[in-house]
Amino acid sequence: MTSSKWGPRRSILALLPVLLAGPYVAWRHHTTLPEPLPANVTGISEARILEYARVLSEDMGFRTVGTREHAAADTWMTGVLEDIRERCVSNEKVACEVWRQEGNGSHRFDIMNTRLYKSYVGLSNFVVRLSAKANANSTEHAVLLNAHLDSQLPGPGAADDAISCGVMLDIINVLLAEDEWEPTYSAIFLFNNAEESLQDGSHLFSTQHPIAPSVRAVVNLEAAGTTGREILFQATSEQMIEAYSHVPRPFGTVFASDIFGSGIIMSDTDFRQFQEYLNVTGLDMAIIGHSYFYHTRADVIANIQTGVAQHMGENALALVRHLTSSKSPLPTLVEGYTKPSTVYWSHVVGPFVVYSAFTAKLMYGATLLLAIFLKRAGWNNVGKGMTLGVLSFLGALLGANAVALGMVAIGRGMSWFKNEVGSVILFGPGAIVGALSAPILFSIQTLPSERAVFEGVIMLNLLLAFVVQLAGIGSASLMWLTGLPVLVGLVVNDLVSKDAVGVSLVGYAVGGFIPLVTGTLVLLPTLEVFVPLTGRMSAEAPADHLIATIVTVIGTLMLPLLAPFTVRFLHVTPGPETDGEPQGKVDIESGRRGLKGGIVRCSIACLAMMAVYAKNQVYDEMHMRRVFVLRTENITTGEHHLHMAASDAAPGFPALVADVASAIPTLHGEAALEGKSLEYFEVEMNDYNGDWDPLYPFSAFLTPYKIPLSTGANADTVSYWHDKFTVQAVEDVRDVIKGERRLTVRIRHPGLIWTVIAFDAHVLWWNLDGNPPPERARHHIKEASFYGKDEWEVKMVVKMEDNAEGLQEGAMWPGKKRAYESYLQQAESEDGVVYSRGGGEAPTMALFKELDEWLDERMAKAVDATLIGAVAGVETI
């Protein structure tokens, strides 16, 4: 066999424009956002949206369910919607109805393979319905837009989810300002006021609001980040996927839906409540870029990228227009909906692509048959080519995970955390080393030709696409979008080259460009989700191996032609390259030696990258470590503890705990202990670790430590909380004959929020949603109620010992920072009253203030600490 092919360096240089252009085109498309519009425009305005979000996140602040700030947002929303009601009076075509819903309830909330029960008292929602004045039947079918007003404990929630509330308010403004808009079907806007407490607000609306039965479909707006386009990550019917095709800037693939539906991302949204209690379909969309700020104090307006609100607003408005028009699918959803087997995806050009599973099977099968028809190499060689493709992938997987194992072994795990794409730079060389090693497994006699491997890659991707689609997995489209362009490259190659065993560089350029673009479009949002997610997945999660595997799997889709390109130089070793054509000669052994040399060079590059990343600090001010600090007072034992926990596998947390234990005597004002370190110890996190019950079940992600605190001069003083935080059995009736005990457990908690009772019992009956387990089990019942609602109860038939805990409403840092500073300045503010009542919040907040400042200085602002005061105890009833 003879050839005059260029050597690897010149060939790579020739293909370099393609190798750079593909990812660049995808990156530009992924990061491009619309120009934000000012407040004086008639359409969607980012300026107006962000002003709503600013008021909620900055003027109101941390809107944790049960706090004064949460109640302040409720009052503000009442005024905003009253203004909308008044504006609507003059609209000749649109009728407006506004409700402030308030109610009590309970529901079962299973997540992370954990059974949990929720109870709430006095929670509120705000509901706006727009319908046609001239058509009374327009209210029969409705689309529901949902966003939540509350924020999570650690953050002010500018993106999550104030920006979505702003989007919904601006959509209402835009529609009411238009003279021509007259809905065929109604639009309901739900501003639910309790999502972060595990979806209590959406449960309240779904189960108790009188217009809930008219809802046919839901569009849920969420945020888990502060930058980039909002992604469609969950779509539950063919009708709603088709509706999404009408948005001006679609961003979504069935791959994202498959990933979220698999449960690997242990998260959930209000969408769940609407599905479970209203049996409706819909779309779930969220901002996901730079999710390092998700549920942190950095979730503020200043960190929201310009154009984000405009993008979400314009897409959401387009959905409302379509779903309330005469072309809406809403009436067809009365009898339920068809779970989607639809394949959908968006690309850099062209429309949002939607086709049925049946069409997918026909397309993928036909493409596979076409590839078979165009095949030139013998089946034996093509089979070897497919085998080499599989071995290259397995080698890449092994190589990347070897790097991950090495980084963890030297104590430098998660060194890629600060840069999502940077993980490719670390794990990519290892993957390439593994992929390049695959051809060495073949002898000189059995090594397939370049053409056979090229065709084998096509067959492998198209066969997998067809088989995976037969299994009902829509993500098979990724393999088809890889195999089809490579097949086109082969066709172009045959037009420009008559080589029966080789492939021209033109074939590589044409066949490799689209997979590079498609793969990058998939890789970027996947890393945007999973890299920051590893910072809250627990210390046991194999974070490095997870990211290494993601880089390898998607990288294989990006570079499907790496295997044939490697084989290209095993059959021919080029001679010296000159200004003219290079001189080639047949020397397979030299080619193998050249490949081994390439593997060595790539291995050196891999080790160099490991050395560079080993010097990286895992966290910084823009990519913070999440640290949870809980100061508890046990009113049963009189003990006080400082609990610290992290939710990641990065090194350094035990050392941080040790430093805090050394600093506490000074920060806590204990002169006798200054210069001495308090003892600390790691504790096991399980269902019986009641210290972290207010965060249950997400507490399972935490690695907790405990630091005993001195009670000082107050050691013999009766706790302020001893007669305020109580768990009592009332209406207690014992049936000795049946061996049953019927009682009502009443929990009083003035000044405390998010109270929890945890107990072991064989519960025969209770008034919570869902039947209790038929045997003795560990139960957790969590409460989240409106500010000032200080009592809740559970009726049951049981005998039990009860463990209770609640969070101090006035002892949360930085959530109550503004209120505490008001108290220190002796300002005439109602916010400051709580620190004068003697409940322990003032000294707790003093400690938190000092500790937070110390952490900022010690960790160079690379830690986002959530500091919470708690009261706990054990009660036998």
Image (cartoon, rainbow, N blue to C red):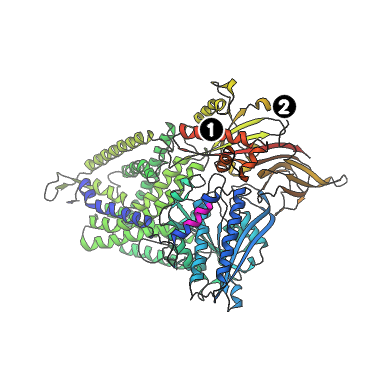
**Is 51 colored magenta in this rendering?**
yes
- Left or right position of 733 against 174: right
Residue 597 drawn at (x, y percent): 26, 38
Residue type highlighted by circle 2? Asp
Residue 295 drawn at (x, y percent): 52, 46
Q: CA distance from mark 2 to mark 1?
A: 26 Å
**Residue, disc 1:** 850
Tell me the residue at 58%/50% (across/down).
196
Looking at the picture, tell me which residue is in the foreground, 248 or 348: 248
**Secondary element at tag 2:** loop
- Left or right position of 499 against 127: left
The boundaries of the magenta stretch are 50-56
Asked if one can make out residue 253 in the rendered structure from this viewpoint, the answer is: no
**Residue, disc 2:** 716
Work out which residue is located at the far bottom of the displayed protein and give it.
134
Residue type highlighted by circle 1? Glu
Determine the main secondary structure of the stretch shown in magenta. Answer: helix
Asked if one can make out residue 496 in the rendered structure from this viewpoint, the answer is: yes
Which quarter shows the C terminus? top right
Work out which residue is located at the far right of the displayed protein and give it.
737
Residue 100 drawn at (x, y percent): 64, 61
Tell me the residue at 49%/75% (across/down).
179
**Is 876 colored magenta in this rendering?**
no
Q: Earlier in the sequence, mark 2 or mark 1?
A: 2
Tell me the residue at 24%/49% (across/down).
12
The vertical placement of 267 against 332, above or below, is above
Hey, which quadrant is residue 867 in on the image? top right
Tell me the residue at 69%/26% (across/down).
715
Looking at the picture, tell me which residue is in the foreground, 218 or 666: 666
